[in-house]
Amino acid sequence: MSYIVSTRHVSKIYKGKEVVSGVSMNIERGQIYGLLGPNGAGKTTLMKMMLNLLKPTSGEIELFGEKLMPGSVEMFKRIGSIIEYPIFYEKMTAKENLELHGEYMGFYNKHAIREALELVQLTSIDNKAVGEFSLGMKQRLGMARAIMTKPELLILDEPINGLDPVGIKEFRNLLRMLCTEYRMTLLVSSHLLSEIEQVADTIGILQGGKFIREVSMNDLRSEHTDYIEIVTPHCKQAAFILENQLGVSNFKIIGDSMLRVYESRWTQQELTKALVLNDIEIEALNHKHTSLEEFFMQQIGGGEKHA
Amino acid sequence: MLKLMQLEIKKHKLGWYARGAAIAVVIISFFMWLMPYTEDYGEAGFNDYVEALSAAGLIVRAVFIVFASVLISRFIIDEYKNKTVSVMFTYPVQRKKLIIAKMLLILSLTFVTMIISTFIVILVFLVVNSQFHFIEGKPDGALFLHTGIQLFIQTLCATGVSLIPIYFGMRKKSVASTIVSSVFIMLLLSGNAQGFSLSSNVAIPLILGAIGFVIAYLSFRNIDKTDMV
């Protein structure tokens, strides 16, 4: 198996505090890898270490099968990145910034800039200095800069910040496209779970600097199947009926007024009918899918409160 | 390396530097014109050409050491402050090369402007002198050659000295301390105590110049291992 990025027991101690501790993770070629974690989990630190901006206190990182050393630079030709918020030379125009990037990367393709700007839908910017851009525009420009050299690996730290809902949707499509059409491998960090859930192939969860779990989205989907959620004030009676009349065994009572039925052989109609015939008031009955958000909450033990 | 220096120029644009230098040269020339008139207030003006030429060189060097600190702030300190270094350091170029390109650019700009400015200021002074006769007699070629070589060496040293503020600026990534330290260095070098000035002795500027290069080297020796927070 060829890993594009692989870290082994990487730790970073910053000002006496262990910000990242013993992270071992692998990213396969052609994947979109979602790095998930609440603020301050160490996502940015981990990504910065991959880019050699921070040096690991212990452990090692391999990029494209090559060990990352303090003076390594060659591999960065093959990497595009946005770390934290995108940084530009604010007095220069978007185009000048991209030209400069191309020069430093050793990438000379006149069409690449226009192409990249089109991909992120940032074409009507003319000759405005980047300093006058909104955060959303900068985010798009940062993305354009990261992808203009067609790198093999994209490292994107919170790329969704500052985008509006339409922008987020476009962005998701763009990530998919980069992965499928340009064969890029992507590492995308986020604390917005619902966003990453829809694009990632594999998800790594980071909390308090520790790598908690890595799951492939396919496994996760089968692991967390659909269920029907029933909201009723007579929870116990409803449970009794489900169990004794319908023979449902796989269900769960959540709180005082909620039931989840995990068996798919019963349709919503059948359940409603059974409950109504027994005079049980139903406030709501819905078909649901466990989102990654809940899974994530379980993992980090965040309780009921959603991020 | 030349390519990297070109990119630095592209990034930081140098129009402001050229304008600033031009204004400085005009002011220094004017100052040189006024200097002889201080004689009336008990201070000595210029006794001979050597004195006048050395004074011109000294003022020019002092002024452009401060200019160099502004270049350092723009090229190096600002990149750290604006965090654009963290973009630069993800490029497939050795960090040391990037920094050396910046320093070479600062050095060559400072050296070239010092030389040209000294030349212009002296030229203006000679023209003015031919009208006002502050100094009697005509200067001879040997004198010019001698003083010229001396000025050249002093300028070379001053260029090295101009790198010293990097150390103070990099400690806290502060533009203010870069420029303030350069002003101190300038005062130290051009300060005159009862006829003795640090720059009148050849050895001292030479040592300071060397120190400048060493400090610049030390400031970035570990750059590959440094964390970009």
Image: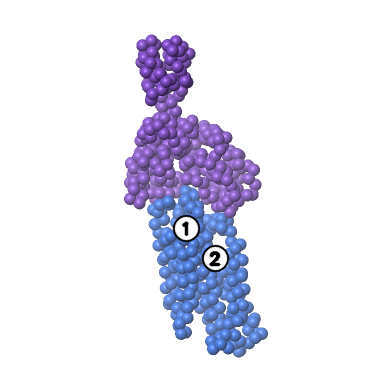
Chain colours: A purple, B blue
Residue at numbered disc 2? B109
Residue at numbered disc 1? B99
Question: Badge 1: few (under 14), some or many (20 or more) residues near its Cα, within 10 Å?
Answer: some
* Residue A4, horizontal then vertical, whole percent: 42, 38
Q: Mark 2 lies on which chain?
A: B
Q: With A152 as the anchor, is A95 left or right in this view? A: right
* Residue A116, horizontal then vertical, whole percent: 58, 41
Question: Badge 2: few (under 14), some or many (20 or more) residues near its Cα, within 10 Å?
Answer: some
Give the amino acid at mark 1. Ile
* Residue A164, horizontal then vertical, whole percent: 56, 38
**Residue B209 in sight from this viewpoint:** yes
Q: Earlier in the sequence, mark 2 or mark 1?
A: 1
Tell me: residue B165, above or below residue A4.
below
Asked which secondary structure carries label 1, the reply is helix
Q: How far apart, in angstroms, are the residues tagged by discs 2 and 1?
A: 15 Å
Q: With A204 as the anchor, is B19 left or right in this view? A: right
Dividing the image into 4 quarters, which one contains the N terminus of chain A? top left
Quadrant in which residue A215 is drawn: top left
Residue visible at 43% across and 33% down in the picture = A306
Residue visible at 47% across and 48% down in the picture = B90
Q: Which chain carries label 1?
A: B
Give the amino acid at mark 2. Leu
